Amino acid sequence: MEKLSLDKSKIKIVLLEGVHPNALDVLAANGYTNIDFHKKALEGQALIDAISEAHFVGIRSRTNLTDEILEQAKKLIGIFCFCIGTNQVDLDAAAKRGIPVFNAPFSNTRSVAELVLGEMILLMRKIPEANAQVHRGEWKKSADGSHEVRGKTLGIIGYGHIGTQVSVLAEALGMDVIFYDIETKLPLGNARPVSNLSELLAKSDVVTLHVPEDDSTKNLMSAERIGQMKQNAILINASRGTVVDIDALAAALEAGKLNGAALDVFPVEPKSNQEEFVSPLRKFDNVILTPHIGGSTVEAQGNIGIEVASKIARYSDNGSTLSAVNFPEVSLPENKGASRYMHIHVNKPGVLTSLNKVFTQDGVNIVGQYLQTNAQIGYVVIDVEKNTKANLLEQLKEIDGTIKTRVLY
Ligand SMILES: NC(=O)C1=CN([C@@H]2O[C@H](COP(=O)(O)OP(=O)(O)OC[C@H]3O[C@@H](n4cnc5c(N)ncnc54)[C@H](O)[C@@H]3O)[C@@H](O)[C@H]2O)C=CC1
Ligand SMILES: O=C(O)CCC(=O)C(=O)O
């Protein structure tokens, strides 16, 4: 008889970076108990040692899963980011090994939007300087340069899940909202798209960044772009550190071009809470610096724990790759009494024919078949009448182009 899916107690899940305990509860409720829970991020050999036998790994933004690290994790089936950003994972290296990468695209977005809103109000009132001065014993009561946000223009760069929420909240405060996105986006409320970045920068009293880390956003806020901002404007970045040229920002602050800035993310962030944060921005009283905590609220982390752990259980139990960021997305129905074979392969001619031959030549009755491909890989899921024949999995493994196969039930 065909060997079926691995016993759940043998499926090893490694969770790093102190993901919320809700994740453990969800996994336990789904029968997964073989879990290594690490409070911190790991790197180098310690990371390799931790994940070398893992079937699933859960991380946040601090763990770098590079091609070299993934090469040492031969049993890995899925990578789960308990956050939005997936730039810390080599997505292509994972895909070529048949490893889908999942994230939590919504659960911490409100937390980031609220932080940005709060920072914007504080910076427009020059509260960071006032706070620092009073802490030093200085008393400088003044209205100079202190403004309401009502009636001011907010420019949002990147009108996605976070940018749109900032837009709605800012309008509720009476702000005029304009936005720039490389995609055509539905404007919410009275927000208006602008056709280029220069226009947004020239019109905005506050500019806030909500774009992903990629080639198009590297140093998006360069010296030139910061120079295009209004005199006395404010810059907020809670997206990714690579998006702002920090030296250019420091120069603009030094020159009195900007009234203030808030940064939650940095090109180089300390690897642990013990490491010192080094930045030319530390000396400015009118800059709010936070340690990448935009999404770090009890609510967001609790929800992410549930969301991502449910995705681990779903991919493990059912094979669904819905919402994977680097993989063909296959949404699968619950399996009702069939055996489910999953086959991940290089997307090239002939693989499907060979695959179907394995089943047809053995007279196996196929009761469901699901296929998605992208330029790199193909993912086929085949439901067949239970236990019809032995060694189907072995035959699937032998097909030229096979990356990974798995059987459930
Ligand atoms: N500070 C923190 O703790 C957190 C940071 N983030 C980061 O916030 C960023 C945004 O997150 P979401 O809004 O959820 O992402 P999203 O994917 O929903 O939206 C990003 C938007 O940026 C647009 N975009 C991409 N490249 C662009 C470019 N070159 N110029 C203009 N627009 C561009 C996209 O079309 C999209 O509409 C991500 O980098 C994420 O990693 C997310 C959560 C927490
Ligand atoms: O601290 C974290 O979990 C990372 C938050 C973040 O930057 C994200 O969700 O992209």
Image: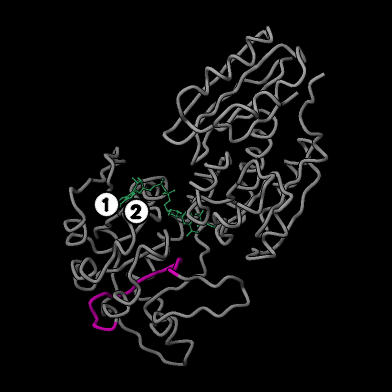
Identified at 26% across, 51% down, the residue is: 177
Q: Which quadrant would residue 239 be assigned to in this image?
A: bottom left
> The residue under label 1 is which amino acid type?
Val
Give how far across and how far down residue 9 sits, in percent. 83, 40
* Residue 177 - label: 1
Residue 330 lies within the magenta run:
no
Q: CB under 8 Å between callouts 1 and 2?
A: yes
Q: Secondary structure at mark 2?
A: helix
Identified at 65% across, 41% down, the residue is: 77
Residue 177 versus residue 189 in the image, above or below: below
* Residue 233 - label: none
Residue 264 lies within the magenta run:
yes
- Mark sitting earlier along the chain (1/2): 2
Residue sticking out furthest to the bottom: 137
Q: Which quadrant would residue 209 be assigned to in this image?
A: bottom left
Residue 49 versus residue 189: which sits nearer the camera? 49
User: Would you say 374 lies left or right of 73 here?
Assistant: left
Give how far across and how far down residue 110 sits, in percent. 48, 50
* Residue 170 - label: 2
The quadrant of the image that shows the C terminus is top right
> The residue under label 2 is which amino acid type?
Ala
Identified at 32% across, 67% down, the residue is: 235
Give how far across and how far down residue 32 sits, in percent. 78, 40
State how the image is colored: one colour
Magenta segment: 254-267
